[in-house]
Image: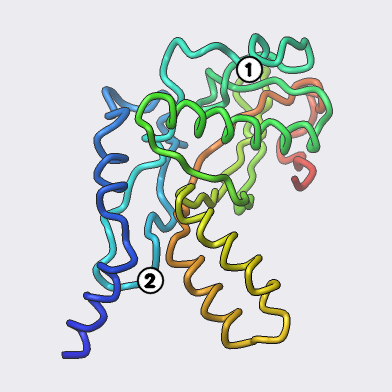
Amino acid sequence: MKKDRAKQKTEDIVDLDLFSKLLSINEDDGEDEAVDYGDGEFVAAAFGDGPDGPDDVSGKKFRLPDGHPVPGDILKTDAVSGGWGYTMRDAAVIQGGIPGEHAFIEFRIGEELRYLEKSSGIKLVYVDHNKFAQELIREGNDSYDFLSVQIEVIPEADWDQLKADWESHGGYKKDRKGRRNHENWRESRTIRFTEHFWFNVNALFDIDGEDGEDMPDA
C-alpha cells in the first residue's frame, strides 16, 4: 500500500509527456567521436526522487545539430574559436582562461535550450551548472581541459508557477514549513543531466611541459 501511494505521488508531479518528447528528438545516429569520454551521460534525469520516475534521458538529446553555426560566428568575436566542445576534435578555444571557460559553458547551455525550444517547442529554464570532474588531457602536441558538468533546468511553466508562489509568499521568510514545501516542489520539477566540455588549452600551458602538470581548478 505504501508503495502504491508513493507511485501515485510521483505520477502526480512528473511530466511524462515532456520526457517522452525529449526522448524522441535528436536521436543518436552514430557513435561518439570521443571514445573514452563520450558526451551526455545523465547524472539524475528525474523530476523527483520517487521510485517510479521517468526513464533516464541522454544528455545527447540536448546537443546542437551538425551544421549549427560555430560559437565564434554567433558571438562575432575572435576571442572564441573552434567548435562547441562536445568532443576532442570539436574542442573550443577560449581566451580568458578559466573565467572564459565558465562563460562558454553558460553560453552553450543557453544556445542548446534556444535550439531545443525552436526545434521542438520545449521550453526549459536554465537554473545552474556545477563542475564535478576536471582533467588535463595530452594528445600529441595538444593539451585539453576536459570538464564534466551537471546542469539543472526546470520546465518554463513550472518555473513561472514556482516564481509566482515564492514571490506571493515573500520568500517564505517567516514560514519554515512553507519554505520546505516550496523547496521540495522545486526539487520535484528539476531536471539534472551531465554534459562534457572539451577546451583546447595550448595557449595556457607549455605543451612541451612535463606530463602530469595540473590544470588550474575551474
Q: Secondary structure at mark 1?
A: helix
User: How far from the left and from the top, in percent, is residue 82?
Assistant: 63, 14
Near mark 1 (Cα within 10 A), the count class, few <14, some 14-19 or many ≥20, is: many
Quadrant where the C terminus sits is top right
Answer yes or no: is residue 193 visible.
Answer: no
User: Looking at numbered disc 1 in the image, what kind of residue is underneath it?
Assistant: Pro
Q: Residue at x 70, y 20 (%)?
A: 93
Q: Is residue 41 above or below residue 69?
A: below
Q: Residue at x 54, y 45 (%)?
A: 125
Q: How is the image coloured?
A: rainbow
User: How far from the left and from the top, in percent, is residue 36?
Assistant: 44, 35
Q: Nearer the viewer, residue 33 or 67?
A: 67
Q: How many marks?
A: 2
Q: Which mark is residue 71?
A: 1
User: How far from the left and from the top, in percent, is residue 213?
Assistant: 77, 39
User: How far from the left and from the top, in percent, is residue 134?
Assistant: 64, 45
Answer yes or no: is residue 161 visible.
Answer: yes
Q: Residue at x 54, y 24 (%)?
A: 88
* Residue ID for mark 2: 49
Q: Is residue 181 above or below residue 67?
A: below
The quadrant where residue 189 appears? bottom left
Near mark 2 (Cα within 10 A), the count class, few <14, some 14-19 or many ≥20, is: few
State how far apart marks 2 and 1 are (Cα).
Answer: 36 Å
Q: Secondary structure at mark 2?
A: loop
Q: Residue at x 49, y 74 (%)?
A: 184
Q: Which mark is residue 117?
A: none
Q: Nearer the viewer, residue 169 or 143?
A: 169
